[in-house]
Image (cartoon, grey):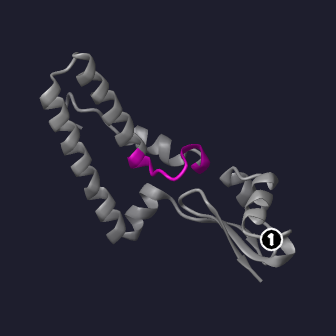
Amino acid sequence: MPAGHPDLRPGVLIVRFAATRAFGKWSALDIILAVIVGSNLIRALTGSAPFLPTVIAILLLVLLHGLPATAAARWVWLSTLTKGASVVLVKDGEPDEAAMKGAGIGQGDLRMALRAAGHADLTTVKSAALERNGDISLIGR
Protein backbone atom coordinates (compact mmCIF):
# COMPACT_ATOMS: atom_id res chain seq x y z
CA MET A 1 0.00 0.00 0.00
CA PRO A 2 1.24 3.51 -0.75
CA ALA A 3 2.08 5.66 2.24
CA GLY A 4 -0.89 7.54 3.64
CA HIS A 5 -3.46 5.08 2.30
CA PRO A 6 -5.29 2.82 4.76
CA ASP A 7 -4.90 -0.90 4.26
CA LEU A 8 -8.41 -2.35 4.26
CA ARG A 9 -7.34 -5.97 3.96
CA PRO A 10 -7.35 -6.67 7.73
CA GLY A 11 -10.84 -5.16 8.00
CA VAL A 12 -12.12 -7.27 5.13
CA LEU A 13 -10.67 -10.41 6.69
CA ILE A 14 -12.07 -9.65 10.14
CA VAL A 15 -15.54 -8.94 8.83
CA ARG A 16 -15.44 -11.83 6.34
CA PHE A 17 -14.60 -14.40 9.00
CA ALA A 18 -16.90 -13.00 11.67
CA ALA A 19 -20.07 -14.93 12.29
CA THR A 20 -22.44 -14.57 9.33
CA ARG A 21 -25.34 -13.91 11.64
CA ALA A 22 -23.56 -11.02 13.35
CA PHE A 23 -23.89 -8.87 10.24
CA GLY A 24 -27.11 -10.18 8.73
CA LYS A 25 -27.28 -10.10 4.97
CA TRP A 26 -24.45 -7.65 4.36
CA SER A 27 -21.19 -8.67 2.72
CA ALA A 28 -17.84 -7.66 4.21
CA LEU A 29 -17.44 -4.95 1.58
CA ASP A 30 -20.91 -3.58 2.36
CA ILE A 31 -20.09 -3.28 6.06
CA ILE A 32 -16.73 -1.62 5.46
CA LEU A 33 -18.30 0.82 2.99
CA ALA A 34 -21.03 1.69 5.51
CA VAL A 35 -18.44 2.40 8.22
CA ILE A 36 -16.33 4.56 5.89
CA VAL A 37 -19.33 6.46 4.55
CA GLY A 38 -20.73 7.01 8.04
CA SER A 39 -17.40 8.18 9.39
CA ASN A 40 -16.88 10.61 6.54
CA LEU A 41 -20.43 11.94 6.68
CA ILE A 42 -19.99 12.72 10.36
CA ARG A 43 -16.76 14.59 9.60
CA ALA A 44 -18.49 16.60 6.86
CA LEU A 45 -21.53 17.37 9.01
CA THR A 46 -19.50 18.45 12.05
CA GLY A 47 -17.25 20.66 9.98
CA SER A 48 -14.00 18.80 10.65
CA ALA A 49 -13.73 18.11 6.90
CA PRO A 50 -14.78 20.31 3.97
CA PHE A 51 -18.37 19.44 3.08
CA LEU A 52 -18.47 19.37 -0.73
CA PRO A 53 -15.18 17.51 -1.33
CA THR A 54 -16.13 14.98 1.34
CA VAL A 55 -19.56 14.37 -0.21
CA ILE A 56 -17.94 13.99 -3.66
CA ALA A 57 -15.45 11.49 -2.21
CA ILE A 58 -18.30 9.54 -0.61
CA LEU A 59 -20.17 9.41 -3.92
CA LEU A 60 -17.01 8.16 -5.62
CA LEU A 61 -16.62 5.43 -2.98
CA VAL A 62 -20.22 4.35 -3.46
CA LEU A 63 -19.74 4.19 -7.23
CA LEU A 64 -16.49 2.26 -6.83
CA HIS A 65 -18.27 -0.14 -4.50
CA GLY A 66 -20.25 -1.30 -7.51
CA LEU A 67 -17.08 -2.55 -9.24
CA PRO A 68 -16.32 -5.42 -6.85
CA ALA A 69 -20.03 -6.28 -6.70
CA THR A 70 -20.13 -6.53 -10.50
CA ALA A 71 -16.88 -8.49 -10.54
CA ALA A 72 -18.19 -10.88 -7.85
CA ALA A 73 -21.23 -11.57 -10.01
CA ARG A 74 -18.89 -12.50 -12.87
CA TRP A 75 -16.20 -14.53 -11.07
CA VAL A 76 -17.27 -17.24 -8.63
CA TRP A 77 -13.96 -17.24 -6.71
CA LEU A 78 -14.32 -13.52 -5.95
CA SER A 79 -17.95 -13.97 -4.95
CA THR A 80 -16.96 -16.75 -2.54
CA LEU A 81 -14.13 -14.62 -1.15
CA THR A 82 -16.32 -11.57 -0.51
CA LYS A 83 -19.66 -13.18 0.30
CA GLY A 84 -18.73 -16.62 1.60
CA ALA A 85 -20.23 -20.00 0.72
CA SER A 86 -23.25 -21.92 1.91
CA VAL A 87 -22.74 -24.52 4.65
CA VAL A 88 -24.70 -27.80 4.69
CA LEU A 89 -26.15 -28.19 8.19
CA VAL A 90 -28.43 -31.19 7.66
CA LYS A 91 -27.94 -34.06 5.21
CA ASP A 92 -30.57 -36.80 4.77
CA GLY A 93 -32.34 -35.63 7.92
CA GLU A 94 -29.21 -35.88 10.10
CA PRO A 95 -27.70 -32.70 11.55
CA ASP A 96 -23.98 -32.13 10.97
CA GLU A 97 -22.95 -30.98 14.44
CA ALA A 98 -19.45 -29.94 13.34
CA ALA A 99 -20.80 -27.81 10.50
CA MET A 100 -23.42 -26.28 12.79
CA LYS A 101 -20.80 -25.46 15.42
CA GLY A 102 -18.45 -23.99 12.81
CA ALA A 103 -21.26 -21.80 11.43
CA GLY A 104 -22.38 -20.68 14.87
CA ILE A 105 -25.80 -22.32 14.47
CA GLY A 106 -27.34 -23.99 17.50
CA GLN A 107 -30.18 -26.48 17.82
CA GLY A 108 -32.57 -23.63 18.64
CA ASP A 109 -31.65 -21.80 15.44
CA LEU A 110 -32.24 -24.95 13.42
CA ARG A 111 -35.59 -25.61 15.11
CA MET A 112 -36.67 -22.03 14.40
CA ALA A 113 -35.79 -22.44 10.71
CA LEU A 114 -37.70 -25.73 10.62
CA ARG A 115 -40.82 -24.11 12.08
CA ALA A 116 -40.53 -21.10 9.76
CA ALA A 117 -40.49 -23.45 6.77
CA GLY A 118 -43.47 -25.45 8.08
CA HIS A 119 -41.57 -28.54 9.27
CA ALA A 120 -42.21 -30.11 12.67
CA ASP A 121 -38.86 -31.87 12.90
CA LEU A 122 -35.91 -33.16 10.88
CA THR A 123 -37.72 -36.33 9.77
CA THR A 124 -39.39 -34.31 7.01
CA VAL A 125 -36.17 -32.61 5.88
CA LYS A 126 -33.76 -33.93 3.28
CA SER A 127 -31.22 -31.12 3.72
CA ALA A 128 -30.71 -27.72 5.29
CA ALA A 129 -28.04 -25.15 4.54
CA LEU A 130 -26.87 -21.88 6.01
CA GLU A 131 -26.87 -19.64 2.95
CA ARG A 132 -24.38 -16.87 2.20
CA ASN A 133 -26.87 -14.23 3.31
CA GLY A 134 -27.39 -15.80 6.74
CA ASP A 135 -30.71 -17.52 6.01
CA ILE A 136 -31.23 -21.22 6.64
CA SER A 137 -32.85 -22.92 3.64
CA LEU A 138 -34.55 -26.29 3.85
CA ILE A 139 -35.35 -28.96 1.27
CA GLY A 140 -38.10 -31.36 2.27
CA ARG A 141 -38.17 -35.07 1.55
**32 shown above or below 77:** above
Q: Is residue 43 positioned above or below 97 on the image?
A: above
User: Which residue does the image show at 81% across and 74% down from the upper left?
Assistant: 93
SS class, disc 1? loop
Q: Residue at x 41, y 38 (%)?
A: 10
Kind of residue at disc 1: His
Q: How many marks?
A: 1
Place residue 11 in its image quadrant. Answer: top left
The stretch in magenta equals 20-30
Q: Please identify the quarter of the rendering in which residue 35 is found.
A: top left
Q: Position of residue 41 (x, y in %)?
A: 28, 29
Residue 114 horizontal/vertical position (percent): 77, 65
In this view, the residue farthest toward the left is: 53
Q: Is residue 38 left or right of residue 94?
A: left
Residue at the spot of label 1:
119
Residue 6 against residue 82 in the figure, above or below: above
Residue 58 x, y percent position in the rendering: 23, 38
State whether the magenta stretch is mostly helix, strand or loop. Answer: helix
Residue 47 left/right relative to 123: left
Residue at (54, 47) in percent of width and height? 17
71 on left or right of 126: left
**Who's the residue at 61% across and 60% down the image?**
135
